[in-house]
Image (cartoon, helix red, strand yellow):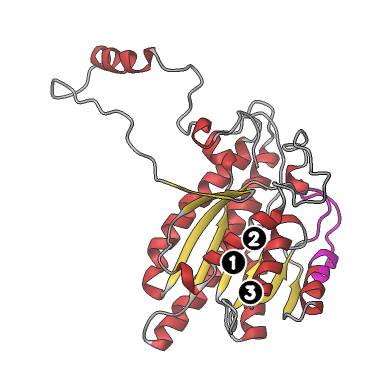
Amino acid sequence: MSLPLEGLSAIVTGAGRGLGRAEALELARLGASVVVNDYGRPGRDGSGDASATPAEEVAAEIRAAGGSAVAHQGDVSDFGQARDLVGLAVSTYGKLDILVNNAGILRDRMVFSMSEEEWDSVIRVHLKGHFNTTHFASVHWRERSKAAGGPVYGRIVNTSSEAFLAGSAGQPNYAAAKGGIVGLTTSTALALSKYGVTANVICPRARTRMTQDVFAGFQEPEDGSLDALAPEHVAPLVGYLASPAAAKANGQLLVVHGGMVAVVERPKVAAKFDTSKDVFSYEELEGVLGAYYEDRPLNETFAAAEVLGLKRGGVA
């Protein structure tokens, strides 16, 4: 019996640790050949000396289990290095079929305290990094589709966050980048569907180096059972979205953690008001919107955290 991803090749960025590592191992378990990408900086803020060791260790782990994997040490926020990453997959395995974007850093600060560099660095690694790899993967799939005269196989799984959904007060850079990734994903999904490519985005909740402060109050089980916040709860969804079975899932946003997957709907209109004249006046808007907001909670933001049972503050 063949494996779901047998004969397919994949890239997983930020795969030297945490979520990316679990996802790379899962794709390999399902039969994919994997390019394990990681820049290898030890700090979750992207600080420290870059090292090839994290990516090499995960690639070696996959090979030791009987799979096929190569390591790539590179910064996906660099356009040229992202091109080389996709090129490595194509030159090693003949083609690229699956792209999982996971690489990221954190530089948390309240908006009034955040520096320009703290803003730019997080936007660059998360949002630009997702774009860079997606760009070169999409070029590859478009060229293959033209040569084949029809659709090919392509899967993109991007990584957003509940920080985008719930509004994480101390992470304006991270929340903005993760919101941008959702927009990038839905646009990509529409642009590439005719070539046989799907693009979906997940909001994972997991205990990793990135979230060690966020989940400090959540205790790990002492009985040896799998932690509800273990990255291994997220990896199977990535494997499914990368598979042929998920052909009809495109442009979707899914929240995943601890044995739960939630499909999130696109925003809906909560209320609608029409002017009684040709153009709204200030006074008329004050009347209709003032009455609407009068009895609503002061801090009820556009994306209410309560929908998913979240607490206010930082989230994964």
Label for residue 30? 3
The amino acid type found where label 3 is placed reads: Leu
Q: Label 1: which residue? A: 239
Q: Is residue 311 magenta?
A: no
Residue marked by disc 2: 235
Distance between mark 3 and mark 2 Cα atoms: 11 Å
The magenta region covers 40-57
Residue 271 % position (x, y): 30, 28
Residue 14 in sight from this viewpoint: no
Q: Amino acid at mark 2?
A: Ala
Q: In percent of the image, x 73 and y 80: which residue is there?
A: 67
Image coordinates for residue 32, horizontal then vertical, percent: 63, 77
Alpha carbons under labels 2 and 1: distance apart: 6 Å
Q: Residue furthest front?
A: 223
The residue most toward the left is 277
Disc 3 element = loop
Q: Is the magenta region chiefly helix, strand or loop?
A: loop
Q: Say whether disc 1 or disc 3 marks the residue closer to the N-terminus.
A: 3
Q: Are marks 1 and 3 in contact (CB under 8 Å)?
A: yes
Closer to the camera in the image, 268 or 112: 268
C-beta proximity under 8 Å, tags 2 and 1:
yes
Quadrant for the N terminus, please: bottom right
